[in-house]
Each structure stands twice: as structure tokens, then as C-alpha cells.
Image (cartoon, rainbow, N blue to C red):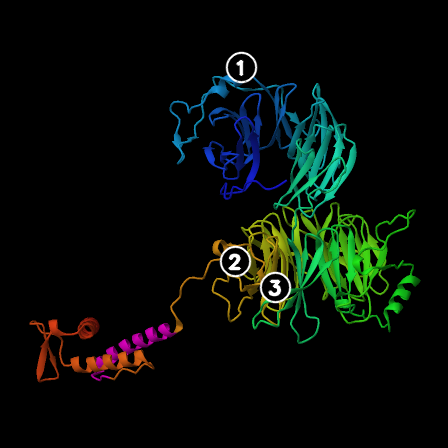
């Protein structure tokens, strides 16, 4: 499998649906720009545009036996198109539409709406007539592309209707779901399956649509995709929590393929290879083989950044940067001492996990890096093979202490670095257990001792970590639990089960309040007491899912971001204080800079915005990344922010108010480098970074101010009958010589302006013709003359103003 072709900038807005016409090798795309575009699948050439919809095009369906394209939209319409772009019919309904499916056995078109399932029969004769219509109808507004292909933008009459309502719509919650129907699939065995945002699956028999089978709470999060494996008669479902499941067509779950850090945006079964393809909301692709369930995309090598952490290991020394990657590795970046610049290079690559590293914290007490991953584990790693600070004289003391608490230890070879201790054949490893893995020291590092890694685990992927007082670690997971771990013994202390009704997405701790906040796939967040683990209050106000939450110490408030495109601040008792609307899309990462009183929000549009929480507008925007930013931190000794992105790059940015910051702050300071390789896609700067506008240099601004002041001084001197010599500007070199020449010419020409004959007098003895002057002499003469005329005009206005004032006083 290899990438064949990329069509860049296919639409101005997000593409929501695609369909394929195998007969003509054409690809159709529908977008938020309300357009359908047809592309040559072999060359990538745009063939035509098809307009008519007045809202987002949510789904496209090409039916080969009809040679017709169906489209649906949030504008409440279904539209029928010939395979050459002619619009054959428009069906108007009473609500937005979200998905389409073709039932070959019954010749039905199934359309999913909000708590409604519409069923339409197809008039085959009318469909055949519509399919052979190749040209735009008379009276339509037809234009052409540069290549001559038509753009049809008209609606024909409904003389030959292709679609007819087969039955009244199935209404929820009795006959269908009670929320948006996201996907519909018709199987070859006579079943119709629908998925909804209410996490329910409905299974219909084609002859018994009024009595569907319900599978409630079939997913921990809302469904986002559905596909049909016709070779095995299996259903594939994808959800917002990244979970992909395999079902029988009767509604029994058969297998769970993956837990991704990204929403499963689309699924499909590829008959040629018999693989399942899954695409994420932000572009990552994975393929699975149902014959031996597992990821069959090892050729995809990714270093997408998932988290960034800056740590000052030794006071007074430069910070060390840790970046967590989607492949489970953590990179340690160090300041390159060989270069006299703020350039960083990779000092160590640590393969800590089997999949995405989703969170990182650094414990100064342990001198250890703690990471959490979607592989359900938490690892405590003493980087650089440092001796852990636990009041013990040797590593053997650490091992003995752990073994006393019942933790197994195992020594592994140097080639098996960071691997977990294997369990016995008859031993199960439940969630919440602790395992220890030891590795031999790297011979290149002269420490004389092995490294130690402790592995803690949840029953679902771990999405957040927070360090609490008294050597306590808090973790949250998709298993909907909050767990507290003792970092003295690495044992589980407390567990809060069912902390939220949906999978938990993150946690943040407030040291001044001794409270922490958690958020899940809900429109609210909970604040907990860090000692008793009791819920203190809820942050309720968002109208969509809360994506991030942080404690802002500099304002003494909680800050939350939601999918309703708002940032909200909350008091320490849960009262909403302010609300800031933004236009950048969902917030992917939120960082609080207490040192500079700023909150940085990285949004879906790949731009990071800095807010001071006083104004609703961002104080600065950081533009330059090619993909969404997933991690932000601050380097205090440099006054720089560091961002990590899915575009495989880390970038440094000047903080707000930094002396070297640009007025717009829209250019990256420097890219982190690995050796001599800049981790930045080629051409990214050329397309995504914009230089600040040109400004008048400070020196010229000062000269301009001096000239204005000189003009005003001369005016005042003339009014008083006194004339002061102009102050000399401090010039040097060529500028000094030009200044001397200018003053000499002015002195020579002060006697009088040019007379009518074009002769100017030098002193009082002789004159030279104006046409015989040099260019500089002419320029100086004209300038002097114009200045005298302006001053005369100003004086005349002043005299008139004084006379009018005197006249008014005398009349009074």
C-alpha cells in the first residue's frame, strides 16, 4: 500500500463526504462550502463543480446500477444528480440530513436525520431517463471551468421524479434513535443498521421496519462511523473515543480492534486486500486485517507530537525539553552547546510505550519522568540512569523496598530496555496493578548502576496525570476512574469509579486550593477535593463538550474551553465569571503561564492564541505550524514558549512583551533541530509564516520629529520677529557631508527666492540663472521657496484670526 496522489486545496472548507464512480473513474467530494466537485481519480484534475445546496453537504452516495449521485445537506434537502452533473430532482424535508444508504434488495434510499429515518423508493424508469441527460437544461445558469467542463447551478422541474416516499418517516425514540442518526448501512442479508449520537444501535429487518432491535449504550462515547464487511457479514463501528468495534449483524460484539487518541472519523472495508481502514478526525490512517486482528500499517512511521514538557533539572542551568510522540517514544532535547544560539538537539530517545504518549509530568522529588499512554500504562522512568531520591543508599535498597510491598522485580537484558516484567502463565494482570522492570546500564554512560522503570496500569487508556502533595500521583483514564498512587511505594491508594458518565479526558491540579479538576466527553467539568476525593462543585455552562480545563493562579480562577467555541473563567466556588468567544475551532491544548499572566490556547485552525483574560481578543497569535498543536510549555530562562505539533515539529516563540517579539508575533523564533535536520516540513515557512509589516525605522522617526519641531519653532520665531538657527542633526560620513552642503546652500539662498526672470541672487553681488543650477541647488531653491510660501499663508491666517477676534471683542 502506498500513497498514489494528493489533491491539495480541493475545497475552501472542510470536506465532509466523498463518493466514487468506478465506471468513469471519478471521485466526488462534498464540503462545508456547499459545493460538490467531481475529480478525475487518475490525474486529480477537477472536472466540474455542482452547486445548488444551501448548507454543508453531509453525505454523498453514488449508485452504480442507477448511474446517479445522491447528496444530502443540513439545508433540509436531498438532491439527485446524473453522473455528468445535471441536477434531476430536489426533495425538501423538515430538518437537517446527515447520512445516506442504498438498499439494493428493496431499491430504497435511506436518509438519516435528527431522530428521523426517511425511506424513499426509486422509480427506475425515471432514474434511467435522468441518467442519460448529459447537458444543462434550457434556462439554467451554466458556466464552464477553464478546461471547458460545465458547472450546473440550476434546478430542473419535477416532471420525472426519481424518489418517492415509500412510507412515513420512522420517528424516535420508539421507531429510531432519539438523536442525530450518524450512519446507515444496508447489509446483503436483509438488515438495516443505524447508529446515533445517543450511543444506541438500531437493527431493522427490511420487512419489519416498525419493530427494530435496540442495542442501548453500545458505545462509551457517541458513534461517529459505520461500515459493512460483506466478506464476513460483520459490522464495524467507530466512536468519538477512538474505539473501533466489530459486531455481528444481529448486534453481538465480536472484537475490539483499537483505542486511538483520535476520533474514528470514517471506516471502510477494502475488498481487494480484505482490510479495514480507519481515518481519524485529524488525518491519521490505520489499517487492520480481520483475519488476524491487528495493525497492519507498520510502514507508517510517525513522530507526531502529543505533549511537550520543559524541566529545569538543575537550578541555573538551561531547561531540558521532553516531547512525547505518537509512536510511544519520548525525546529529550538539550541545548546545543556547540552553537552560540538557542538551538536544541535530541539527546536521548526513550521507547517507553507501545502507542501514543498522552500525558507527561516530572517529579522533582523522584527526579523521574512519569508518562501516560493509550496502552493503559503509566511509566515512572529515571532518565539518564540517575539514582532515585528515596533516602536509600543503593538501587538494591529500592528493589528490596518494592519487593516488601509485593511488587515483582525482574532483571532484563540491555537489549530489552524499558520492557515490562512478564506475568506468569496462570496469572492475570488486572487494572491498577504495579509492575517493575530493570535494565542494565548503558556501557556508554559511566554511572555504574542500572536504570529502573515502574509500570502502573489502568483498564483503559490513560489521558491525564497530576502531581499532588505528599508524593502522590493522580491519573484519569477512559475506564472512567480517578486513581491516586503513592510514589513512595508505587502502590494504588484510592480509586474513584464512575467519576464521569463518559471517558475522562484530562486532569489539572490547583496547589493553592488543594483541588483538582477533571473533564470528560461532557459539557461540564468536576472539581474535586484532593484529600477526600469528594466532588466540590461542577463547572456548568458550556453548551458542548468541554475539551480543556486549567487552574490560572495569576487570576485565582478556573479556565475551561469547549466545543461551543468559548473560553470561560470560573471563580473558586464554581460561579462563571467571564466568557470569551473565539473563531479558531476546538481547543486542542490549554496552557497557563502564571509568570507572565497569560493563557495560551492551541486551536483546531493550527494557530495558538495568547489571552490575558482581561480582553476577549487575543493579545498575540502564533502562526506557523502545519498541523494542530498538541503541547505547550514555557522556558523561563529564555522567555520563550515551546509548542509541539502533529506536523512533527517543535517550535520556539517569544512570549508576549519580550523585547525581541514582533508586533504581530506571527513568526517562529527558531525550530528545534535534530543534528542538522530542521524538523519542519519543506516550504512551511514560505506558506504559513508571514513577516510583520514594514515599519519606519526609529532613527527616521526621530528625524521626522525633529523636522516638525523645527518648522513649528521657525513659525513661532517669525511671529515674534526672532529667527533661531535650526539645530544640527548628528550625522556622520556621507550624511554629514550632505548636511554641510545643505546648510551652505540654504545660507547662500536666504537672500531672496528666484525672480520672474529665473535668476537667483547669491549674496548681494551676483546671480546665476535658475537653468544653470545643479540639481541639488534647484531642489534647495524650490524647497526654500515653498517653505516661505507656506509660512506666509499660515501667518496670513493667524493675522485674519487675530483681526476677527479683535472685531468681535469691539462689537461686544
Q: Which residue is mark 2?
A: 617
Give residue 746's position: percent from left, percent from top.
20, 80
Where is residue 318 shown, x and y percent of the image?
Answer: 64, 72
Identify the element where label 1 is drawn: helix
For residue 698, side relative to residue 100 (left or right): left
Please state which of the two labelled residues, at mark 3 or mark 2, is closer to the viewer.
Answer: 3
Specify which label sits upstream in the sequence, 3 or 2.
Answer: 2
**Over which residues does the magenta segment extend?**
699-723
Disc 2 to disc 1, how far (Cα)? 59 Å
Rounded to the nearest whole Å, what is the CA distance between mark 3 and mark 2?
39 Å
Q: Quadrant of residue 212?
A: top right
The residue lying at 55 percent from left, 66 percent from top is 654
Q: Which mark is residue 675?
A: 3
Direction from residue 810 to residue 727 in the image, left or right:
right
Return the residue at label 1.
125
In this rendering, the answer to whether 99 lies above or below 332 is above
Q: In which quadrant is the C terminus drawn?
A: bottom left
SS state under label 3: loop
Q: Are marks 1 and 3 in contact (CB under 8 Å)?
A: no
- State the separation of the CA atoms marked 1 and 3: 68 Å
- Specify whether residue 585 is in view: yes
- Is-magenta flag for residue 595? no
User: What secondary structure predominates along the stretch shown in magenta?
Assistant: helix
Amino acid at each position: 500500500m502506498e500513497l498514489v496522489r494528493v489533491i491539495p486545496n480541493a475545497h475552501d472548507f472542510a470536506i465532509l463526504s466523498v463518493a466514487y464512480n468506478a465506471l468513469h473513474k471519478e471521485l466526488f467530494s462534498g464540503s462545508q462550502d456547499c459545493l460538490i466537485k467531481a475529480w478525475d481519480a487518475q490525474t486529480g484534475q477537477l472536472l466540474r463543480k455542482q452547486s445548488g445546496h444551501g448548507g454543508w453537504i453531509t453525505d454523498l452516495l453514488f449508485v452504480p446500477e442507477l448511474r446517479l449521485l445522491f447528496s444530502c445537506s443540513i439545508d433540509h434537502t436531498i438532491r439527485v444528480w446524473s453522473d455528468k452533473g445535471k441536477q434531476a430532482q430536489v426533495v425538501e424535508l423538515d430538518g437537517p440530513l446527515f447520512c445516506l444508504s442504498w438498499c439494493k434488495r428493496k431499491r430504497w434510499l435511506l436518509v438519516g436525520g435528527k431522530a428521523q429515518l426517511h425511506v424513499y423508493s426509486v422509480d427506475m424508469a425515471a432514474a434511467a431517463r435522468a441518467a442519460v441527460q448529459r447537458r444543462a437544461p434550457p434556462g439554467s445558469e451554466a458556466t464552464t471551468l477553464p478546461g471547458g467542463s460545465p458547472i450546473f447551478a440550476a434546478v430542473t422541474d419535477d416532471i420525472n421524479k426519481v424518489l418517492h416516499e415509500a412510507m412515513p418517516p420512522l420517528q424516535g425514540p420508539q421507531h429510531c434513535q432519539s438523536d442525530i442518526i450518524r450512519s446507515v448501512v444496508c447489509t446483503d442479508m436483509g438488515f438495516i443498521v443505524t447508529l446515533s449520537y445517543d450511543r444506541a444501535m438500531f437493527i431493522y429487518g427490511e420487512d419489519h421496519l416498525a419493530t427494530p432491535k435496540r442495542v442501548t449504550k453500545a458505545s462509551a462515547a457517541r458513534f461517529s462511523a459505520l461500515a459493512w464487511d460483506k466478506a464476513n457479514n460483520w459490522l464495524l463501528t467507530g466512536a468519538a473515543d477512538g474505539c473501533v468495534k466489530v459486531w455481528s449483524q444481529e448486534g453481538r460484539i465480536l472484537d475490539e480492534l483499537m483505542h486511538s487518541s483520535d476520533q474514528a472519523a470514517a471506516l471502510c472495508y477494502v475488498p481487494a486486500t480484505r482490510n479495514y481502514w480507519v481515518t481519524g478526525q485529524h488525518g491519521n490512517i490505520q489499517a487492520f486485517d480481520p483475519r488476524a486482528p491487528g495493525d497492519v500499517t507498520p510502514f507508517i512511521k510517525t513522530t507526531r507530537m502529543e505533549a511537550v514538557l520543559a524541566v529545569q533539572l538543575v537550578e541555573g542551568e538551561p531547561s531540558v525539553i521532553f516531547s512525547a510522540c505518537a509512536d510511544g517514544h519520548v525525546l529529550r532535547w538539550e541545548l546545543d552547546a556547540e552553537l552560540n544560539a538557542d538551538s536544541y538537539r535530541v539527546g536521548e530517545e526513550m521507547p517507553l510505550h507501545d502507542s501514543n504518549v498522552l500525558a507527561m509530568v516530572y517529579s522533582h522529588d523522584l527526579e523521574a519522568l512519569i508518562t501516560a499512554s493509550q496502552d493503559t500504562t503509566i511509566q515512572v522512568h529515571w532518565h539518564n540512569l540517575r539514582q532515585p531520591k528515596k533516602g536509600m543508599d543503593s538501587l538494591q535498597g529500592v528493589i528490596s523496598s518494592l519487593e516488601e510491598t509485593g511488587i515483582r522485580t525482574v532483571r532484563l537484558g540491555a537489549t530489552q530496555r524499558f520492557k515490562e516484567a512478564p506475568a506468569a502463565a496462570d496469572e492475570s494482570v488486572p487494572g491498577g496493578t504495579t509492575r517493575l522492570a530493570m535494565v542494565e546500564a548503558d556501557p556508554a554512560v559511566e554511572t555504574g548502576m542500572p536504570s529502573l522503570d515502574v509500570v502502573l496500569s489502568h483498564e483503559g487508556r490513560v489521558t491525564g496525570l497530576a502531581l499532588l502533595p505528599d508524593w502522590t500521583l493522580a491519573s484519569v483514564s477512559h475506564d472512567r476512574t480517578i486513581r491516586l498512587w503513592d510514589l513512595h511505594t508505587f502502590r494504588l491508594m484510592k480509586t474513584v469509579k464512575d467519576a464521569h458518565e463518559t471517558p475522562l479526558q484530562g486532569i489539572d491540579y490547583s496547589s493553592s486550593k488543594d483541588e483538582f479538576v477533571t473533564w470528560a466527553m461532557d459539557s461540564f467539568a468536576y472539581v474535586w477535593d484532593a484529600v477526600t476525593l469528594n466532588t466540590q462543585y461542577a463547572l456548568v455552562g458550556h453548551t458542548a463538550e468541554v475539551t480543556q480545563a486549567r487552574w490560572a493562579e495569576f487570576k485565582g480562577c478556573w479556565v475551561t474551553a469547549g466545543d461551543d467555541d468559548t473560553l470561560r473563567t470560573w471563580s473558586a466556588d464554581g460561579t462563571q465569571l467571564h466568557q470569551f468567544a473565539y473563531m479558531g475551532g476546538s481547543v486542542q491544548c490549554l496552557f497557563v503561564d502564571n509568570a507572565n499572566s497569560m493563557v495560551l490556547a492551541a486551536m483546531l485552525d493550527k494557530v495558538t492564541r495568547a489571552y490575558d483574560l482581561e480582553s476577549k481578543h487575543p493579545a498575540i497569535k502564533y502562526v506557523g505550524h502545519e498541523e494542530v498543536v498538541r503541547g505547550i510549555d514555557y522556558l523561563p530562562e529564555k522567555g520563550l514558549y515551546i509548542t509541539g505539533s502533529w506536523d512533527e515539529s517543535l517550535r520556539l516563540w517569544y512570549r508576549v512583551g519580550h523585547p525581541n517579539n514582533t508586533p504581530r508575533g506571527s513568526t517562529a523564533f527558531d525550530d528545534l533541530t535534530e543534528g542538522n535536520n530542521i524538523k519542519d516540513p519543506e516550504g512551511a515557512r514560505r506558506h504559513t509564516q508571514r513577516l510583520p509589516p514594514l515599519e519606519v525605522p526609529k532613527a527616521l522617526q526621530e528625524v521626522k520629529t525633529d523636522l516638525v519641531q523645527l518648522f513649528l519653532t521657525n513659525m513661532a520665531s517669525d511671529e515674534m520677529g526672532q529667527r533661531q538657527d535650526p539645530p544640527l542633526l548628528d550625522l556622520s560620513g556621507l550624511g554629514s557631508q550632505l548636511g554641510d552642503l545643505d546648510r551652505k546652500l540654504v545660507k547662500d539662498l536666504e537672500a531672496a527666492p528666484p525672480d520672474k526672470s529665473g535668476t537667483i541672487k547669491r549674496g548681494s553681488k551676483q546671480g546665476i540663472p535658475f537653468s544653470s543650477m545643479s540639481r541639488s541647488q534647484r531642489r534647495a531653491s524650490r524647497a526654500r521657496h515653498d517653505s516661505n510660501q507656506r509660512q506666509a499663508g499660515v501667518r496670513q491666517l493667524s493675522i485674519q484670526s487675530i483681526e476677527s477676534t479683535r472685531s468681535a471683542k469691539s462689537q461686544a
